[in-house]
């Protein structure tokens, strides 16, 4: 009744931006990501007959409130699957994410929780079923089941049974690197969930976003298959700009960008001008991730570190999918 | 055969962003602006039988190249109207625009040129006809025929005869002020014309932009009639963000914003947080214009001047339309 699993976070190159079902976490568009070696969560779930409620420890600290409720709600799903609805668990998670790296820990967190929880309670899930389950904890987490490049197929069914991630290319296949550029100020006024919702409901550009995704996905998968870095990078960068553009047209409008975000984007453009192929992507926050190739690592790190308002630059290689310890 | 006219520039609150006819300068959407007192062009046109070509002096300097060609091409239109196609002119323009204010001088420039040129050659045009003529020199200039708030009605006809500006509210009616925030670096990689064209042709958000304009216009005209500053400001700001968002989705994507642009936008938001009603708008370049009310002038100027990367803040009241000297 006890299992430990490790999962890595992932960075979306084609963004997940909008839900068609809030409860089941079903997206309005398919997305594609790269799992990263540098940022992981290791979680042990132990179901115990003698517990009367769940307990959640994160980095050895007891967690309550909203984060605890999301974990219990997710354990409820696992209990339902297993037909053991009165069985509670202790959950111990360790985040191996550099402090303030600006990565949402929910992707690695829910992937590890799903894997450890399902194994602990005795469910025998294949990757697809595990991805489908994970999705209901945190949408983007469903891609972290796999290493390397993975696509979350949005699916069409209202019960979500065809909405899960599939592997596109394993981590070993292509050593594309990611620099996480951490800003000194990472304040955001609108949460990812709220921003996504407001955009879907009010942005006149949302339909244009949705319409443009199938082609972005087709192109980037061809580029990954061909290991065409410039193409992967420019599609990812354009997709990110498009996603952020939808928020500027929301009502009321908003943006996740800071002035430093803008400087990082400019620097990445300048690097390309200097012959260094580098491309940025930005999630629902001010931090920036920069894609580059191994041979440019030293120069990319230096250029990014020199930007005023940048507090840290953390490098990562492609990472593996779920593993059990 | 000689006349002098003065025109002021204008700042669009609902942006002109896209042409449906490049030659006639017919827009894909109606727009609305405020004519500004602070920035004007005074132009004298003298048609002379003894000239064999046009001559254009700007701020007492002989102008050649592209700017000269745009002026002659526009004089050709005036000559055609008057049936005097072999009559050339000297054009003397004085720009009363603070150096590097980041205002396109084309709006005041072509409005003054049209008014002086038409009068000098003996055409008797009413405001509507003058606006229609001016439009063919520079689209946004057609709004500078009027003082205060003016709307450029896009029209529907392919010959452009129903595409001209109309007055919405004279300068005297409402003292809304504008601070032109001039950045130290005003470099832009994509010209307004090229940016507009690329956006119309490639942005998946362009249809959403067009669809959203009629409601923006309706709302802002109601707000102007009611002198509802918060409403005018927030509609203008949202419309500007929406326009700039269309460029982020173009192929290839681009932006006119710099990091300082971002800081100015943030400061304006912060001012509102501090109870000062202020709203920004940005044309196809990195400079920012801030709308505010007279009672907040001192505080607004101070806050904007303190922003790192801002080189000047120039204040303006609503301005008058065309006058003849």
Image (tube, coloured by chain):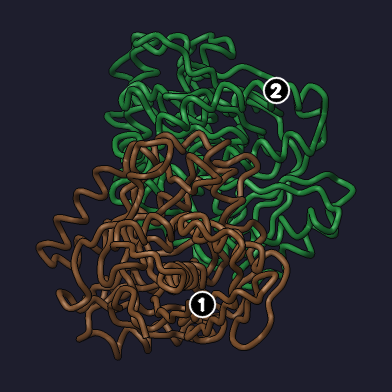
Chain colours: A brown, B green
Q: Number of labelled discs? A: 2
- Residue picked out by circle 2: B221
Q: Which residue corresponds to the image point at 62% horizontal and 88% vertical from the top-left? A: A60
Q: Is residue B125 left or right of residue B219?
A: left
Specify the quadrant of the image occupied by residue A188: bottom right
Judged from this view, the residue extending furthest toward the left is: A226
Specify the quadrant of the image occupied by residue A52: bottom right
Residue B150 lies, in percent from the top left, at: 64, 24
Above or below for A6 versus A12: below
Q: In front: mark 1 or mark 2?
A: 1
Residue A63 lies, in percent from the top left, at: 68, 76
Few, some or many C-alpha atoms within 10 Å of disc 2 (few <14, some 14-19, many ≥20)?
Answer: some
Q: Which residue corresponds to the image point at 49% horizontal and 81% vertical from the top-left? A: A44
Residue B91 lies, in percent from the top left, at: 44, 34
Q: Quadrant of the C terminus of chain B?
A: top right
Can see residue B284? no
Can see residue A108? yes
Which element carries disc 1, helix, strand or loop?
Answer: strand
In the rendered image, residues at marks 1 and 2 fall on the same chain = no
Which element carries disc 2, helix, strand or loop?
Answer: helix
The subunit letter for the residue under badge 2 reads: B
Q: Which residue corresponds to the image point at 40% horizontal and 18% vertical from the top-left? A: B78
In this orientation, which residue lies closer to the viewer: B217 or B321? B217
Check contact, mark 1 vs mark 2: CB within 8 A.
Answer: no
Q: CA distance from mark 1 to mark 2?
A: 61 Å
Few, some or many C-alpha atoms within 10 Å of disc 1 (few <14, some 14-19, many ≥20)?
Answer: many
- Residue picked out by circle 1: A45
Above or below for A320 versus A24: below
Residue A292 lies, in percent from the top left, at: 27, 76
């Amino acid at each position: 009744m006890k299992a430990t699993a490790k999962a890595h976070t992932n960075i979306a190159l084609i963004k997940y931006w909008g839900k068609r079902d809030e409860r089941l976490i079903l997206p309005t568009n398919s997305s594609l990501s790269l799992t990263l070696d540098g940022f992981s969560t290791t979680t042990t779930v132990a179901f115990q007959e003698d517990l009367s409620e769940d307990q959640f420890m994160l980095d050895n600290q007891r967690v309550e409130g909203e984060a605890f409720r999301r974990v219990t709600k997710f354990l409820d799903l696992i209990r339902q699957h297993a037909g053991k609805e009165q069985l509670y668990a202790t959950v111990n998670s360790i985040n191996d994410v550099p402090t303030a790296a600006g990565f949402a820990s929910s992707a690695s967190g829910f992937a590890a929780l799903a894997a450890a929880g399902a194994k602990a309670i005795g469910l025998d899930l294949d990757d697809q079923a595990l991805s489908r389950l994970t999705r209901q904890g945190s949408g983007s987490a469903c891609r972290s089941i796999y290493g390397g490049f993975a696509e979350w197929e949005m699916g069409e069914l209202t019960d979500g049974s065809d909405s899960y991630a599939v592997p596109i290319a394993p981590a070993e296949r292509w050593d594309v690197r990611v620099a996480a550029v951490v800003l000194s100020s990472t304040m955001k006024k609108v949460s990812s969930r709220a921003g996504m919702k407001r955009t879907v409901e009010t942005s006149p550009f949302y339909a244009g976003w949705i319409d443009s995704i199938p082609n972005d996905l087709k192109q980037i998968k061809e580029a990954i298959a061909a290991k065409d870095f410039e193409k992967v990078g420019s599609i990812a960068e354009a997709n990110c700009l498009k996603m952020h553009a939808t928020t500027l047209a929301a009502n009321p409008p908003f943006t996740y960008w800071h002035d430093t975000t803008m400087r990082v984007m400019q620097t990445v453009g300048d690097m390309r001008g200097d012959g260094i192929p580098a491309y940025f992507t930005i999630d629902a926050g001010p931090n920036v991730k920069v894609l580059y190739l191994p041979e440019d690592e030293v120069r990319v790190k230096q250029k990014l570190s020199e930007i005023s308002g940048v507090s840290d630059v953390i490098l990562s290689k492609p990472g593996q999918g779920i593993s059990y310890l």
